[in-house]
Amino acid sequence: MASYIVMPKLGLTMIEGTISSWLKKEGDYVTKGEPLIEVTTEKITLEVEALETGVLRKILVEEGTTVPIQEPIGIIGEADEDISKYLSGEIIPESHIGMNENQREVSANKSLAETPAIKDRIKASPAAKKMAEEHGIDLSGIAGTGPGGRINLSDVQKAVDASREVEQLQSEYAQIAVSSNSVPLQGLRKVIADKMSLSIHSTAQLTLTMEVDATDLVKLRHDIREEMAKTEQVKITYNDLIVKAAAMALKDYPLMNSTLVDNNIIIGDTVNLGIAVALKDGLMVPVIKNAAKKSLATSVRKQEIWLTALAGDSSCPIN
Amino acid sequence: MNQRELLYQDAITEAIRQEMERDDTVFIMGEDIAGGGGRADQGIIDSWGGCYGATKGLIQQFGPMRVLDTPITESAYIGACVGAAAAGLRPIAELMHVDFLGVCFDQIFNQAAKFRYMSGGKVKIPLTIRTTIGAGMRGAAQHSQTLYSLFAHIPGLKVVIPSNAYDMKGLLIASIRDDDPVCVFENKTLYSSKGLAPEEPYTIPLGKARIAREGSDITIVAYSKMVNYSLEAADILAKEGISAEVIDPRTITPLDEEAILNSVAKTNRLLVVDESNPICSVASEIAAMVVEKGFDYLDAPIKRLTAPHTPVPMSPPMEDEYIPSAAKIVKNAKEMLG
């Protein structure tokens, strides 16, 4: 009997796949286990083997097309078998049994963006489930090594061992903290720590290191230094120029000037630029508000006010 | 007790002889069981003792009133035994091949199995039916079946399946002494196998499994000849680092559920090996029992390794392929642990 070849589910999170190539032509004889298609998912490209032996009667989905998993992509059967019922849709693939026409339409047209997160039933042996429950292990975080990716006892045992190791390390650290000199986190350091962790969770964090030719920067500073000193009574440093350049760059790349609030990326309409200053008691971050709109001179003055305020601390390197 | 080696078939003869010596109400009936005996007046003093020689010599010791040859009429002599049991005797019936049970099944499942229940316990049927099972003798489809599950299905019957000489003797004596109808299934391919057993009479309680081999990775439950194959398989598996526990429940009804569940709790895997056909089989019953009562122990789906659902083939290569083998047990066990 003929049957549908469907888009396979190649990973836990896979909801659709692209046929990158058919390795057989219509009319070719295919043996079970023989490579049949190449499928590209958002992660990888894989060769997929035929699940049945027969003749590839019809290719339903051409190369380069993306379809949801379980969607029929071809028909395999006997060489002389009548497959008209498959082609007319009279025989529906198993994955569609139990769906009505509308649902079928939806399933066929679903794209990645419209598909809600699929909650897969986690395949785990009864013994593995029980053990996970006893040890408070979340099965969704375990990769199953059993047949068909089933989570078995040994997989849970590994997770249990790993969590024990973490617990042990934590208790060792706790002991070290108690036994050696420990300073409670409070006051300024606590504020700094809180702000830093908030920042990590709410902004895009990245560090880029590159070498640039600063000839023009040096020339610019040289050219305007005296002029600025005369007309605006400010002393231009490289720091001032870098602050200005960063503020201008952020205007051009607004996504870099954004904050994550709940599940929304809020793009800032002004550039408020922090400059980290290392002091003896911790890191202070004076903020130049609306840095992109401020003139260079205003920005420099603002920085100077901050630095003067901090000048009481003799360890301030800028001072 | 004094252990010595004896044949599985001699364990049967010895059990019957000792019970007939102990209890005057014990007698035996069947086709050819006197087998040419009882003719001392004609100068013939030997007898072949049934198709497989399991009752050899009994006619000489106990005479034709207690060792009765019957015509080829299973329904008549099984019925006679049920009547004798109801009247207070303790009969043993030999049904040459279980394949012939069709003609006497009414006597067994409607009469023997029901009397005690329907009489409110006033009538007991202390009947033992001995019969043979097993393929491998080139006996074709009507002489090779392994039909114990049919009996296990009937409430009121006890089903006993000894796999070796020691169990054979102890279980057969326990069956003869039991006040309910008991069907004892002898594997015809095991008659010439040897085992150690004491000379003295002894009993093995019905419903008590034997752990034939201890192990920790997989539980193999098997009956009759399949126990031997499972032990062979366990040897092979051990060489590959797999420790298989082999359990021989020895009786189906009653079934030692505790022994099986305890083992699965330890190994988390169950393979049931059954020479019978798969559908509605003892293998299915044990698998279902473990799923119901030991679900949380399982780390892999239970596997049933049985004969295919076909009649036993006549062709020797096909018959050999039909019977579950040690190699197949190894293959299945490895797949389950894979």
Image (spheres, rainbow, N blue to C red):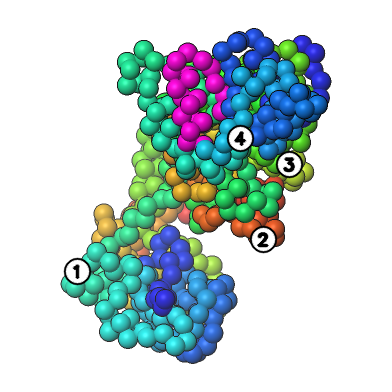
SS at circle 4: loop
The residue drawn where x is 53% and y is 17% is: B90
* Residue at image mark 3: B232
Q: Are marks 4 and 2 on the same chain?
A: yes
Q: Nearer the viewer, mark 3 or mark 2?
A: 2
* Chain of residue at mark 3: B
Which residues lie in the magenta part? B74-94
**N-terminal label among 4 and 2:** 4
* Chain of residue at mark 4: B
Which residue type does callout 3 highlight?
Answer: Glu
| Residue B275 appears anywhere in the view | yes
* Residue at image mark 2: B315
Q: CA distance from mark 3 to mark 1?
A: 55 Å
* Residue at image mark 1: A100
Q: Nearer the viewer, mark 3 or mark 1?
A: 3
Which residue type does callout 1 highlight?
Answer: Asn
The residue drawn where x is 30% and y is 63% is: A258
Indicate the position of residue A123 as horizontal and vertical percent values. Answer: 44, 50
- Mark number, residue B31: 4
Query: Can you say which quadrant of the picture contains the N terminus of chain B?
Result: top right
Q: Are marks 4 and 1 on the same chain?
A: no
Q: Nearer the viewer, mark 4 or mark 3?
A: 4
Which residue type does callout 4 highlight?
Answer: Glu
Is residue A99 shown in magenta? no
State whether residue B88 is above or below residue A119. Answer: above
**N-terminal label among 3 and 2:** 3
Q: Would you say the residues marked 4 and 2 are in contact, meaning their CB atoms lie under 8 Å apart?
A: no
Residue B134 in which image quadrant: top right
Q: CA distance from mark 2 to mark 1?
A: 52 Å
Query: Would you say the magenta stretch is mainly helix, strand or loop?
Result: helix
